[in-house]
Image (cartoon, helix red, strand yellow):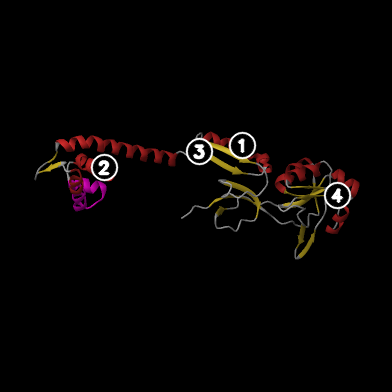
Amino acid sequence: MEVEPNDLLLFARIVEAGSFSRAAKRVQLPKSTVSRRIALLEQKLGERLLQRTTRKLMVTEFGASLLEHARKVLEEVEAAGALAQHRQLEPSGKLRLSVPGDFVNLGLHGVIARFMARYPAVSLEMDLSPRRVDLIAENYDIAIRMGDLPDDASLNARPINLEYFGLYAAPAYLARHGLPEHPDDLLRHDVLCLLSRNGGAVPWVLTRGKVRWERQLQGRLTANSPELLARMASHGAGIAGSSLTFAGPYLQTGELVRVLPEWDLPTASPTPAAPAPVL
């Protein structure tokens, strides 16, 4: 004999309400459905659970003993519901993030510290390498990358900022090697190149109005960190293509100056992405 837990819960609700009609309203079922389910439960058990009169609903002796078990089931269900609600209201568990170390060095550590203070039940696991992780296959929750929005229906992504790129060099370097007046002059300079995801240097693309200049330059230093390129340029290592975010502090101190300011480099956007929910 198999008794459905839902039927035990319904029996407990009827006793609490004191009538089939009030219980039916509370559980949002037709009164006829409530009566039929209790009748089937009594048939399964082979015992009467309730004595119904025109004025009163009474619990039989067997019904009273069964009610104790039904109430325990009800308490467990309510406790499980409260736990689920608490988990929805209070985030908990491990959050796996993939964030390039450059972004952390820009001040993201303060944001992370405030997040941890606000959500003490959440632990963080951070991968600071710049590689493009597979969020789903590698079980990451969030990744922040600089570039175009990913064209992937399995990801939720949105831009959080717009990064402006330019060419920068230290005044001491320019004093030794001269100030470029045209992009072609870069061919005779030490350039610091950004490493592409597929290996090798990212092509240098500059535009001025409708004029486009593109070359595959081979620099003495190639790295996958715009922050490192700006830092190395500030020490006189060469001309770097970097974002204003990373070059800005050195511009303020005079350690870097803009090179070929009338030429623009492509903008990019730091983008957080997360696996899209399955509907």
| Residue sticking out furthest to the bottom | 210
Q: Quadrant of the N terminus?
A: top left
- Measure how far apart labels 3 and 4 are at the Cα level: 48 Å
Residue 23 colored magenta?
yes
Magenta-drawn segment = 20-38
The three-letter code of the residue at mark 3 reads Gly
- Magenta segment's dominant SS is helix
Of the two numbered discs 1 and 4 in the rendering, the one whose residue sits closer to the viewer: 4
Front in this rendered view, residue 227 or 79: 79
Classify mark 1: residues with Cα within 10 Å, few (<14), some (14-19) or many (20+): few
How far from the left and from the top, in percent, is residue 171? 85, 45
Counting residues from the start of the chain, the first of labels 3 and 4 encountered is 3
The three-letter code of the residue at mark 4 reads Asp
Q: Which residue is mark 4?
A: 190
Up-down: is 185 above or below 20?
A: below
Q: Which residue is mark 3?
A: 93
